[in-house]
Amino acid sequence: MKKLPIGISEFSEVVKGNYYYVDKTLLIKDIIDLPGKVKLITRPRRFGKTLNMRMLEQFFSLEGEEGLFDELEIWKKQGIVKDYYHKYPVVFITFKDIKDTTWKKAKESLKGKLSELAKKHLDAIKDDVGIKANIISVAQETANDKDYKNFLRYLTQALYETAGRRVILLIDEYDVPIEAAYTYKNKDEDYYDNMVAFMRNLLTAALKDNEYLKFGILTGVYRVAKESIFSGLNNLHVFTIFENSMTDKFGFTEEEVTEMLEYYNLDAKEDKETVKNWYDSYKVGNFSDLYNPWSILNYISNRLTGLQPKEAAQPYWTNTSSNDMIIKQIETNPAVKETIEELLKGEEVIVPLDPWLSLRELEDDPNGVWTLFASSGYISASRIEQDIYSVKISNRELERFFKRTVMLWLSKLTKTNLPDMYKYLYFMLREGKYIDKFIKKLQDFIVNSMSYHDFAKEPEGVYKGFLLGMLSIAQSGYKVESEVESGYGRLDVVIYPKEKGYGKYAAIFEVKRADDEGKLEEKAKEALKQIKERKYYTRMKSLGYKVIGFGIAFSGKKAYIGSEIF
């Protein structure tokens, strides 16, 4: 049985080391056939970008290893093999590790990365190549700023003059240094501008009007053209998650996942349903059945150790992916939180997206965060019309990420220990315990949180919406509904276990506004009376639950909560 290539991004190691390989070699044909001498491909983290770039390197390179492609799909395209296989000098560089917190440290890391690349190719360059001295200075880290700026161009020229063939340039995760600079720019005011300038100079020199270049490929998560990274680059073609090209070349298709599960004897219905619910529905263009490779590999690995499907289903990708910029947007943009609450109810939300958005514009454009979320793979987006998209949370793994992140955001905002409140909610709905402690935590939460809301219009609606959002981010296993018909009317909010065997209680919340603080308790009792008289508990009881009713009365930012078991 083949090993699982978890954390392995070297193509030759995967093929030669008896690892399971999902064949993406027809990407080579797309690279050759699709327009653009320089192609920028953006996909979420851990979707196979580096492995694919290493695959391209091995196929095109004069120094590529023999025998790696003999059993793979691209080998059937003999015209391509004849014209391109091991025919070109190839330069590969990745910036995925440039994540420093200051510009000084980042500049040292960048120079070190270029020095490593110079050393790798130095012996292959003829001594009579005029610019070899410039490359040696970069290798020794004694180069001036001009030599660093022009290094990739110098290297392509030197390899061309040595081999007599134009050079293929592969640049992996080009945007990681830019994202780090954006994330930490408050610690170092000059970091972001300096990083953008450095990357612009390096890439423009290498990619713009470079007569020694056969073609260039860049990968990343974000399209940051408005940062002027590719200023004046007229031969660039961009393939983002919004385009209908290369749709199945990054990430696993449903067919590929099914084949993998069958290979590892995990093709039972429960496994297929589990991986689909947890890791499916990433979207590229109109293609919406992509699975997260990192999570699929880890799920299978844990299943092979003996874990059951429900135990093996965990948020692998969101626990390892870089989430700093995402979390920053959730924490600093109130409108984001409100929309996420809608998404967590399972709703699709209409938002504007700009695939050309600049990171620099995020602070000025409150809707820019949705482009960030979509590009990063945290939501799936379907185009309705120009720049208007319907977005949703794609699967259970991403739902868990949003629930955890919003919970942390709310905890910081309200200084309330939300995990404790959800712990009491768990025991209350399962065993009918800790009702008083849950009320205390909920009351503290409401009082601390309401100072952030405007009661000028529809104050009861504000309370209901806020309560609904707070309950929606509870741990998985609950169903939250609002304005549900039951008995002789519509109850405000109800939460109950999804699986009847999981718990015996449902909680119904009725909200009332008091004219003044002195009538809070009276209004709370009135809300409980309404639950009883209108028999809001009828539907839940018919489903086999006992019912705990909560009457919530508020006046301004004060609240009182009463309860009764029905």
Image: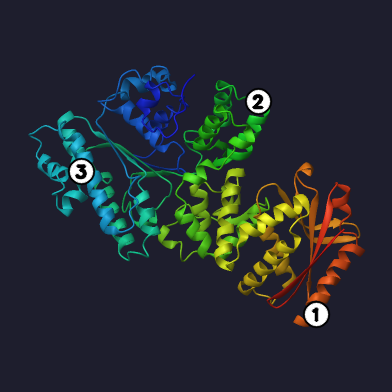
Residue at screen point 55% across, 27% down: 304
What percent of the width, then of the height, locates residue 438? 71, 61
Query: Which residue is label 1 attached to?
Result: 519
Q: Nearer the viewer, mark 1 or mark 3?
A: 1
Query: Which residue is label 3 attached to?
Result: 115
Query: Which residue is label 2 attached to?
Result: 268
Whichever of callouts 2 and 3 sits on the residue coming sooner in the sequence is 3
How crowded is the residue under tag 1: few (<14 C-alpha within 10 Å), some, or many (20+)? some
How crowded is the residue under tag 3: few (<14 C-alpha within 10 Å), some, or many (20+)? many
Q: Which mark is residue 270?
A: none
Secondary-structure class at tag 2 = loop
Q: Nearer the viewer, mark 2 or mark 1?
A: 1
- Quarter of the image for residue 194 reads bottom left
Separation of residues labelled 2 and 1 (CA atoms): 59 Å
Whichever of callouts 2 and 1 sits on the residue coming sooner in the sequence is 2
Separation of residues labelled 2 and 3 (CA atoms): 51 Å
Residue at screen point 33% across, 51% down: 230
Separation of residues labelled 1 and 3 (CA atoms): 74 Å
The reply to whether residue 367 is in sight is: no
